[in-house]
Amino acid sequence: MIDRIHDSDSEAQSLKKVAVVAGGISRYQKPRHETQEEMVAEAMKEALEDTPNLSISDIDNHVCSYFSDHFEQQLAFSWIPNDYLGLTPKPVFRVENGGAGPGTAIRTAWALVASGLSDVCLVSGFEKMGEVASAKANEFIALASDTDFDFPVGGYYTGYYAAMAARHMYLYGETEEDLALIATKNRNYSLDNPYAQWPTECEGKKITVDDVLSSRLIAWPLKVLDCCLLSEGASVIVLASQKYAKKITDTPVWITGLGLGSDMMRPGDRPDNPGFHGMFPSETRSYPKHALKPREPYPEMANFGACKFAARTAYKMAGIRNPLKEIDVVEIHDAYDSSELQTYEDLDFCKRGEGKTLIREGQTYVDGEIPVNVSGGLEGFGHPVGSTAIGQTVELLWQLRQEIRKKHKSDATQVKGAKVGLNHSHAGTGTAIAVMVMER
Amino acid sequence: MKEVQSDKVLKEKKPDEKWSNWGRLGRWNVVGYKIIEGNKGHRADRLERARYMLVNRPWDVMYEHSYGLVSRFFEGLMGKRLLGTKCTKCGDVFCPPRAHCWRNKCRLAETQWVQMPMRGTLHCFTVLGFAGEAFLSDLPFILAYVRVEGANTLIAGRLVGMEPEDVECDMSVEIRFVEQPSGNPMDIYFVPAGPPLARRSAEEKARMRKELEPIREWVSERFGQQHSRQ
């Protein structure tokens, strides 16, 4: 084994500073009847209208994100929005990494700009998940699980997440009510967001914990209101190097930290996976006594080790030592409210097993210590997979620019004075996870 | 003589004749359509109306899929033998099997086949009330991840013979074969090997029972009398 060079600072200094300079969203709903490239164009049009100094001809590279060839029934789809926006002959390619595709696309675009290969790079994302019935859509999504072992027994994503949530609940004792609190938080925040899908399905009414608990069982302990939405929609962001950022906007938001992690494809391969050995000793030490202890107690099937790996990488790069205090606003990939709770722990907002305390104390509400998913998250805002973390980045851009009043129906979900944001993009059963820190 | 030998069929069960039309049934034709008036616009509060044409466009595929170097696992299932693999360097045991060891220091050492015991521990579980299209008629069922005794990986399958409200993580299970295995992980299933462990209150148990009632009703309404694959 070669010696790793730990002193990478001198190398990092040769990278350019990269900013998010513009963003736009084409509302999430199911169904959307505009085509994918038309939705991307609508999002791009919004970005252009908000950024008069930006022209499409300034863009020199395009990274595109969509999740499923099965949903779209079109291979090489990135070529279509690229030509539709008038970007030929500039480079375009797709970045695919399951549900973390959009976060990984942003990371790739960041690398292009930071390295000097691009000055102004577009990141677009879209998905249409409603062209097939819901049960078929769930089958398509389940194709991102191991199709020889996990899928043929009737497995699908809500099932895998439910089993992982059940393990976490068994270890640390949170209740279905704790999960329901998260679902109500996110869904009710989305009512202020004109880009969000949930308001188009709930007739503008707030939901309660009892509504969640009494909704249809999907996979115990998860009910339908504990789960995110199948969505259609699109979003774009534009990244630029410092020199170009200043020409394009007076309010750039800087990308100061990024991380990407991975875990085993089959969640059942995690409890003894040697890959995490010795990596997170404090999480390993705190394993509850009443449970059978696997060889690698963290993350096993109860938490997302790829997230902690990505978060620690991003925090180190951004110089963040106490994420709870230093981060002002967060967008988490809450495909399920249970995974938002698990992710609080994996992002080091609290110790392992204390995710329930954060939500019970209201720390992740808009006026709490660390507001999470005030856009509505995947449960309220929506989850057109290829767009998800790009749309959440646009929400963070508006948060950090204090523009929520302008973009939403009111400033009810504006985190006042927010300076540091965190975006989380999550795939599979936690199989690939990207984390990004953004600063005003 | 050819430099690379051709494939030789050792055993075969041909798909039923009905599958031969599978690829031609849905062939991208427009088999139905709708003209609708719908919404247009990037924000819910600034919409216009637009005219759209929606088409029904079927497309079916039949795959011939290889189980690769762990094919013996699936062949084993057909003969009602549960196999795993073992790394001869570090001793880790895989069920689901891996053809190469996962440990960096074993440098992708090839593993050896071993017979696995028909018992294990349920690591975690869920009770499914919805599923992919292919499995809807089986609802509700218990999906569990089980560590087969001695294995370092967990296998997914279904647990039967216990009410969902009594199932708990870390309980012991026996592994059984279905009567007619077909070379698919559904060939095995789990049954409890001891008394219920669940620490749930009577209230929680009642809630779990109640949550399942509408699922059972929905399945019998949609698929007629409920049937199980087991």
Image: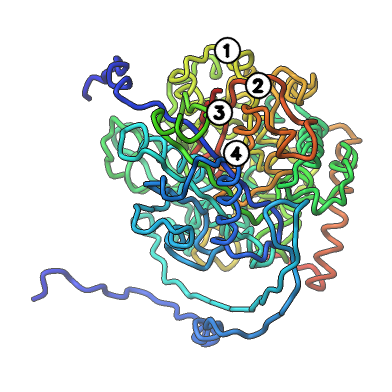
Above or below, comparing residue A234 to residue A190 in the picture: below
Given the image, on which type of amino acid does mark 2 rest? Ala
Q: Nearer the viewer, mark 4 or mark 1?
A: 4
The residue closer to the viewer here, A28 or B131, is: A28
Q: Within 10 angstroms of label 2, few (less than 14), some, or many (20 or more) residues?
A: some
Q: Within 10 angstroms of label 4, few (less than 14), some, or many (20 or more) residues?
A: many
- Residue ID at (69%, 41%): A336
Q: Within 10 angstroms of label 3, few (less than 14), some, or many (20 or more) residues?
A: some
Element at label 4: helix
Q: x%, y% of residue A340?
A: 67, 33
Is label 3 on the same chain as label 4? yes
**On the image, numbered disc 4 is attached to which residue?**
A394
Q: x%, y% of residue A87?
A: 41, 56
Q: Of callouts 1 and 2, which one flags the residue occurring earlier in the amino acid sequence?
A: 1
The reply to whether dot 1 and dot 3 touch (C-beta < 8 Å) is no
The residue closer to the viewer here, A39 or A330, is: A39
Is label 1 on the same chain as label 3? yes
- Residue ID at (57%, 12%): A322
Mark 4–mark 2 Cα distance, whole angstroms, equals 14 Å
Mark 3–mark 2 Cα distance, whole angstroms, equals 14 Å
Q: Nearer the viewer, mark 1 or mark 2?
A: 2
Can you say which quadrant of the picture contains the N terminus of chain B? Answer: bottom left
**On the image, numbered disc 2 is attached to which residue?**
A418
Tag of residue A322? 1
